[in-house]
Image (spheres, grey):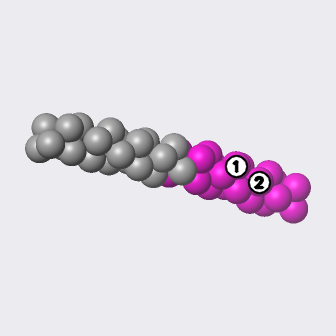
Amino acid sequence: MQNKFHVRRERAERQRTLQNLARKAVLGLIVLTAILTVYAFQQFS
C-alpha cells in the first residue's frame, strides 16, 4: 500500500518536472521569436 503511494508520488513529481521544462521551453521559444522578429524588422527597415 505504502509502496504504491510512493510510486504515485514519484510519478507526480516527474510530471511536475516535465511541466516545468515544457513551460521553460515555451518561454524560450517566445523570447527567441520576439528577438528574431525585432531583428527582422531592423533588417527590413
* Residue 32 picture location, percent across and down: 34, 41
Would residue 45 be found to the left or right of residue 18 on screen? left
Give the prevailing secondary structure in the magenta stretch. Answer: helix
Residue 9 counted in the magenta span: yes
Q: Front-most of 41 and 22?
A: 41
Q: Is residue 7 visible?
A: no
Amino acid at dot 1 = Glu
Q: Which residue is mark 2?
A: 9
Q: Is residue 42 visible?
A: yes
- Give the Cα separation between the discs numbered 2 and 1: 6 Å
Would residue 5 be found to the left or right of residue 22 on screen? right
Residues shaded magenta: 1-22
* Residue 43 picture location, percent across and down: 13, 38
Identity of the residue drawn at 82% across and 58% down: 5
User: Please, what secondary structure does the residue beneath circle 1 have?
Assistant: helix
Q: Which residue is mark 1?
A: 13
